[in-house]
Image (spheres, grey):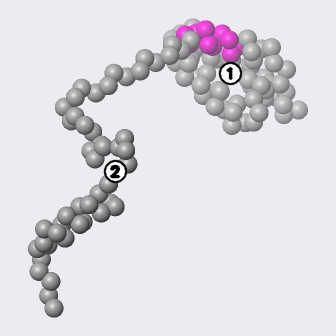
């Protein structure tokens, strides 16, 4: 027996009122209520310290250390890459500070290897 392709009105209503057709309260049927509304304003980012101030603080911390202030090599490498990035953003003076920090870290690495 071949079923007709069209559903009857009662079958269509039964499907549309089944458990899949219900949405939990607070959740609309549509993901976005107004497609033409302007996007929400982005949250204001927190102010980060100036790269030069940050580099000076890192240099003071590394110079005062007697051993590497990082738990492992991966953390030390991450900090070195961060210092290089800060040095690039801070210009000539930042590059000089970054170089001094890397020299101090090299000294600490040498002390660790002994």
Numbered disc 1: secondary structure: helix
Q: Which residue is mark 1?
A: 102
Q: Is residue 112 above or below residue 96?
A: below
Name the main secondary structure of what is drawn in magenta: helix
Give the residue displayed 38% in from the left and 48% down from the top. Answer: 24
Residue 14 percent coordinates (x, y):
23, 66
Residue 61 is situated, as x and y percent measured from the top left of the image, at 74, 15
In which quadrant is the N terminus drawn?
Answer: bottom left
**Number of numbered discs on residues:** 2
Disc 2 target residue: 23
What span is colored magenta in the figure? 50-59
Q: Is residue 102 above or below residue 24?
A: above
Q: Is residue 101 left or right of residue 30?
A: right
- Characterize the local packing of mark 2: few (<14), some (14-19) or many (20 or more) Cα atoms within 10 angstroms: few
33 vs 89, nearest the viewer? 33
Toward the viewer: 56 or 96? Answer: 56
- Compared to 57, does 43 lie above or below? below
The quadrant where residue 98 appears: top right
Please identify the quadrant where the C terminus is shown: top right
Q: Position of residue 101 (x, y in %)?
A: 68, 17
Residue 44 drawn in magenta: no
Picture residue at 69% right of the left edge, 37% below the top: 74
Percent across and percent down for residue 28 are 30, 43
Q: Quadrant of residue 72?
A: top right
Task: In the displayed orientation, state which residue is furthest to the right.
Answer: 114
| Distance Cα–Cα, label 2 vs label 1 | 58 Å
From the viewer's perspective, tell me whether residue 81 is left or right of residue 64: left
């Amino acid at each position: 027996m071949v079923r007709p392709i069209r559903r009857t009105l009662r079958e269509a209503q039964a499907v549309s009122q089944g458990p899949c057709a219900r949405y939990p309260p607070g959740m609309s049927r549509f993901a976005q209520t107004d497609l033409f509304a302007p996007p929400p304003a982005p949250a204001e980012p927190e102010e980060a310290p100036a790269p030069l101030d940050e580099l000076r603080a890192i240099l003071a911390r590394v110079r005062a250390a007697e051993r590497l202030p990082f738990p492992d090599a991966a953390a030390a490498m991450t900090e070195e890459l961060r210092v290089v990035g800060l040095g690039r953003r801070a210009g000539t003076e930042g590059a000089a500070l970054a170089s001094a920090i890397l020299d101090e870290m090299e000294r600490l690495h040498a002390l660790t290897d002994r």
